Amino acid sequence: MRTTDLFDNYLNQSLTAEEKVNFEQQLTSEPALNKAFKEHKQLIAALQDHSKREDLKEALTTIHAKEFASGAKIIPVNSDNFRKGFGRTAAIAATTALIAVLSTIALLSAGGYLLKQQNTQLSELNRKVLKLEASSDAIIENITKPKVVYAPANLEGSAFALNNKGYIITSYHMVKGADSIFIQNNLTQRTLTRLVLTDPTLDLADLKIYDANKVLNWQVPFSLKEKATEVGEKVFTLGYPRQDMVYGEGSLSSLSGYSNDTTMYQVSIPVNPGNSGGPLLDDNGNIIGVIRGKLTSSEATGFAVKAHEIIKSFKSIGADSTKQELLAQGKKVSLKNMKRSEQIKKINPYVFNVLVYKKD
Amino acid sequence: MSKTKVQFTDDQFIDGLRTGSNEILTALYKKYYNLVLKFIVNNSGSEQAAQDIYQETMIVLYENVQKPAFALNCQLQTYVYSVAKRLWLKQLKKNGKTFLFKDDIENELVDVSEDINDHLNKETDIEKMNKSLSELGEPCGTLIKDFYVNRLSMDDIAEKFGYTNADNAKNQKYKCLQRLKKYFFEHEITSIETEKEKNENDRFI
């Protein structure tokens, strides 16, 4: 056995009791061996510390980029931040500005995400954000507030508040493999969320807003409806197929969804890329489902995961505080017997645009 | 509806750092960044310098918390602030600058010199290792790390690196380790300071 192997085995405590005693005796009687052993220990410790330090640095740099560079904080581009750390963001800002001048057309991909590999009929409705996208809003923002620049998200879609505790529901296919997930709307500034729960079979994801201050005054006016909804009922949805919220209405056309999946409703609402994860509401403003996808062959056939399937999914998780919080639905404001436009005013603050960032 | 902000206590931060919780690390990082940023910027540092100092501060805290004997005898905020201040002072001195600090909480400093010294001593070896590993090159670097850090068995290593058997892998590991050792002890204390000097790109007013 080589001396270094002996050292390693001693340090790993894989020597027998006898070998161990022998080795320790040798250490005291042979100064050269003792010195070599000390050096070996120092070398290995340095190696392990080095690795740990590198991992930690990487983690901290990632946190910084996520929390302070890529969105949570406003970065003044024209200051001396234009350096190693923020160079990338600044470069993106420059690109965005350039393209804003060249193009006023928002380029949206046609939601080519396919749910089932063997069948291409159902496309899910995330909005793949091309690098070249620059809506007119973004241009105006660039002109009026040239210092505020966010890196473009890899994927955008819709989401809505589950309850007053800051829980948000969206589609799983949106956030799958996400590095960080932000939400925003007209009233809530871009804020970071964390993934709390996923249920891929229902294409369901549950997020929670990190900053509890953001939800202090929340009064979510709707909740998931436990009872099934009947065919023919009027339904509507709100979502972010583009930067502003878009309303869509229709009726519930079937109690089963794509390929007779009974966890979904079929609705006659024109849905577009970006609607994924948005709420499906009934006339009284109850959430009856979550928009999941549409038929690629038809513009006005959408599918939504049933609300009571979601409640069932929440109930199936083991008893812990998260489960309690997810099921807490108390609503104080009722949307019943309200004009639609009044309902929307109440709902508006609790429907969000989701911005998903992925590594590469 | 509770109005309490989701916040961790100092003890929860320390426990979280010990168990390596990424959530805690993120929350901690967010919590005191602005405090340190403000201090550095108020004392002739750039935002980039603040980020660097803050990162090092987090490393000092993280490493010291891992010691079984570590006990926080002040508020975590005071500890973080004290470490950041000491590190910034050291940086400024190295650049031949002396400053009267503009402090917000001047009298709320604790003595963190021991923790910082431990960190700096470790730093010396880590810098040497960094240099030695880059001289060592691949596949040796990965092989050594797979054995000593990731704790892969010799069989796994043989398979990963395409050696015919564990004994060959073991020979290879031995050769790599001997080279690493040579580089590491050749360097001794040499270039650490100069290396840092080179990376120095902070602007001082």
Image (spheres, coloured by chain):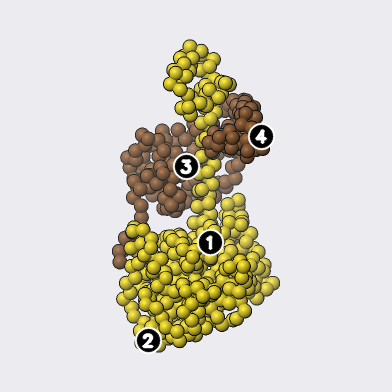
Chain colours: A yellow, B brown
Inter-mark Cα distance, 1 to 3: 31 Å
Residue picked out by circle 4: B163
- What's the amino acid at mark 1? Lys
- In percent of width and height, residue A154 lies at 58, 64
Inter-mark Cα distance, 1 to 4: 37 Å
Inter-mark Cα distance, 2 to 1: 37 Å
Residue A352 seen anywhere in this rendered image of the structure: no
Asked if badge 4 and badge 3 are on a common chain, one would say yes
Residue picked out by circle 1: A176
Asked if badge 2 and badge 4 are on a common chain, one would say no
Give me the residue at 43% from left, 52% from top: B23
- In percent of width and height, residue B165 lies at 64, 32
- What's the amino acid at mark 2? Met
Residue picked out by circle 2: A338
In the rendered image of this protein, does residue A289 appear above or below residue A327?
A: below
Label 4 chain ID: B
- In percent of width and height, residue B171 lies at 64, 27
Label 2 chain ID: A
Q: Which is more toward the observer, B103 or A132?
A: A132
Residue picked out by circle 3: B59
